Image: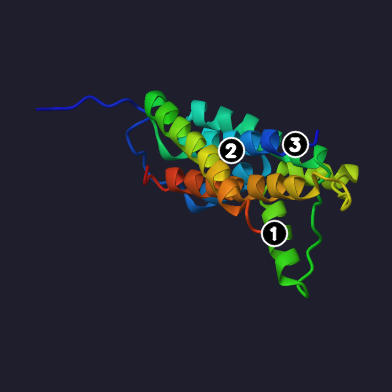
Amino acid sequence: MTSHFLWLVLFSFFVSLVFAVLLRDEPRQQLRTGAMMFGGFVAAALVLGWLMFPFPL
Amino acid sequence: MTTKSTAAERPRAAAEPGTLVLLCLAAWAIPGAGHLWRGRRQKGLVFLLALPAMFLVGLLLHGRIFPLELSEPLVGLAALANVCAGGPWMIARLLGAGGGIVTAATYEYGNCFLIVSGLLNFLVILDAFDIGMGRK
């Protein structure tokens, strides 16, 4: 229950799904947009996480 | 040269103002209901499943449904976002859920799920309104 990465992936999935369905009409386009958005969310979170790693809180 | 278009792709005539209000209320109360009403079955079903699921995950992660306190602007805005979730918000309030556990490791994640599900439902309501107006 405390895996931050799992919640990040789940959150990205839901947001990508809703935005893809909202913005595109064709199922193929929806899948493509959703996949790109989901990948972007997860990749950006990982990259930002690593960039922030040296900074102490 | 003519192009073929399906019924779902063609913009329909704008609905009456009263019908538009009902459409928006239905879309608020039941996420995706506005799209289902206007014949966008696939979109409506996705919203109907995804948005309440997102709200439920937020509750399971010990997120908080914020009270409408205008003295604290950020809390007030979060409360407005919660209200936008519609039916799931009403059910959670009736059941007394959404108290939130501040000490839980997933508290902020829960808040994030709850707030974003409401904001996404607001976008879905606006989309349903556009469809009702015949713009889509």
The chain ID associated with circle 1 is A
User: Residue B57 location in percent, x, y?
Assistant: 75, 36
Mark 2 or mark 1, which has the lower sequence index? Answer: 2
> What secondary structure is found at the residue carrying circle 3?
helix
Identify the image quadrant of residue B7.
top left
Identify the image quadrant of residue A13.
top right
Instruction: Name the residue that disc number 1 marks.
Output: A56
Identify the image quadrant of residue B60.
top right
Relative to the observer, which residue lies in front, B83 or A39? A39
Quarter holding the C terminus of chain B?
top left
Instruction: Name the residue that disc number 2 marks.
Output: A12
Label 2 – label 1 distance at C-alpha: 26 Å
Compared with residue B89, is residue B70 higher up or lower down, i.e. above or below? below
Instruction: Name the residue that disc number 3 marks.
Output: B57
Identity, as a three-letter code, of the amino acid under mark 2 = Ser
Residue plotted at (43% across, 40% down): A23
Relative to the observer, which residue lies in front, B75 or A40? A40
User: Residue B111 location in percent, x, y?
Assistant: 74, 50
Relative to the observer, which residue lies in front, B38 or B49? B49
Residue plotted at (67% across, 55% down): B81
Identity, as a three-letter code, of the amino acid under mark 1 = Pro
Relative to the observer, which residue lies in front, A39 or B66? A39
B15 left or right, relative to B124? left
> What secondary structure is found at the residue carrying circle 2?
helix
Identity, as a three-letter code, of the amino acid under mark 3 = Val
The chain ID associated with circle 3 is B
User: Residue B34 location in percent, x, y?
Assistant: 55, 39
> What secondary structure is found at the residue carrying circle 1?
loop
B125 left or right, relative to B135? right
Label 3 – label 1 distance at C-alpha: 30 Å
Label 2 – label 3 distance at C-alpha: 13 Å
